Amino acid sequence: MFSFDIEYKDSETSARAGRIKTPHGEIETPIFMPVGTVGSVKALSPEDLNNAGAQIILGNTYHLYLRPGTEVLKHFGGLAAFSSWNKPTLTDSGGFQVFSLAELNKITEDGVSFKSHLDGSSLYLNPEKSIEIQEAIGSDIIMSFDECIPYPATYEYVKNSVDRTARWALRGKNAKKRDEQALFGIVQGGIYEDMRKRSAEQLTSIGFDGYSIGGLSVGEEISTMYEICGYTASLLPQDKPRYLMGVGTPEDILTCIGLGVDMFDCVMPTRNARNGTLFTSSGKFSIKRADLAFSDEKIDENCSCYTCRNFSRGYLRHLYKAGEILALRLNSIHNISFYLSIVKNSRNAVKEGKFKSFQQEMLYRLKNNN
Ligand SMILES: CNc1nc2cc3c(=O)[nH]c(N)nc3c(CCN)c2[nH]1
Ligand SMILES: [Zn+2]
């Protein structure tokens, strides 16, 4: 079954350290979830993910529905068994992906018809279908089918969309058959605080196992993202997990942990790894830099990942320039390890009552690029 316990609360910020229990294992929060959109975190094996300290990974209903499809997933006993990932999985509901990836045909009260971005075939998603697919995937935490409101959007559009997302969330909850899966509601509301309040109240009155803060990191100012995130988090139940979707940079994660967020996901560490941008505790840099050709330094002196224990910046630059496949894996191992160390060190700082000073020191160090 699903449970969430807060183990420590910070006294100076809204940060908390907790533990989520799921059928596939426990998750220590704050946590970062590597994105494994179509059933793998790109370039990384489950062993790489375990060695990096990953506790839960994310999959996407939209992509998995298109390929390999629910029949294959059911045949293999769900996504985790299929991909030999033996820890918890969270799936997004398809709302965000349909609106952002597919060629949209029609959005109605019932759902969304669209053309597959793979082969152009006509498909349909609605709350009931999204829940059905997530049940076939067998993820431990599933998301309500929502509309991630684009930015900018008029107040009128936001209000109508918020109300429909709440109706969709209720339909999804009513369609859910498997008790062992936890269902999160996704708060929308654009950048309007009264709409965020409306959405939070609608969803908390329906009642969910946890709440996502949606509709952010979609092009709005960073300061607006922090303001809306903090305000929305303050509206959500203290005793349920809060998941800020699609966020973000190391600075965003450190800041939003202080605003009371427990869960994060972002493609940044894996996507940037594949294009040669590496994250370190004193800022990020490109492995392609010519001045790194003779560098026998590690990526980050403070990192204990497999890549930093075994390879120099010079070698990693060579691999990348040569287009070697190994570059993708080694860079991804490091960036994922770095992101996981941020949330782990944040959790430890909260437990020791030192989160504020830890956060401020990290934010300062991240500013001066090396
Ligand atoms: C990169 N920025 C970003 N913002 C999101 C908002 C939603 C959002 O509002 N709803 C859903 N369902 N997903 C979102 C996602 C995907 C998270 N993997 C977002 N990603
Ligand atoms: Zn490393």
Image: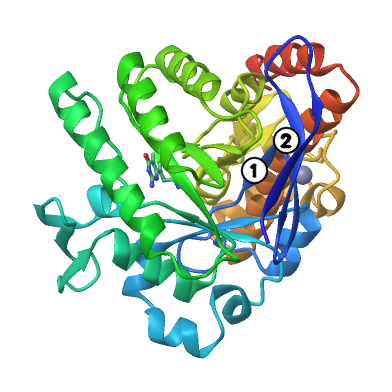
Residue that appears at 40% across and 86% down: 71
- Residue 99 at x, y percent in the picture: 23, 48
Q: Amino acid at mark 1?
A: Phe
Looking at the picture, does residue 357 appear above or below residue 101? Answer: above
- Residue 150 at x, y percent in the picture: 24, 33
Residue that appears at 74% across and 19% down: 362
Q: Using residue 237 as the reference point, say whether residue 360 is left or right of it.
A: right
The residue closer to the viewer here, 9 or 223, is 9
> Can residue 45 be seen at all in this image of the molecule?
yes
Quadrant location of the C terminus? top right
Q: Amino acid at mark 2?
A: Val
> Can residue 147 be seen at all in this image of the molecule?
no
Q: For mark 1, give the secondary structure.
A: strand
First-in-chain label (1 vs 2): 1
| Label number found at residue 40 | none
In the picture, residue 286 is in which quadrant? top right
The answer to whether the residue bearing label 2 lies less than 8 angstroms from the nearest atom of ligand 2 is no
Q: Say which residue label 2 marks.
A: 343
Residue that appears at 70% across and 66% down: 23
Find the residue positioned furthest to the right: 352
Query: Real-space Cα distance between discs 1 and 2?
Result: 7 Å
Looking at the picture, does residue 359 appear above or below residue 30? Answer: above
Q: Quadrant of ligand 1?
A: top left
Q: Say which residue label 1 marks.
A: 32
Quadrant location of the N terminus? bottom right
Kindly check if marks 1 and 2 are in contact, taking CB atoms under 8 A apart as contact.
yes
- Residue 89 at x, y percent in the picture: 60, 61
Q: For mark 2, give the secondary structure.
A: helix
Residue that appears at 39% across and 51% down: 144
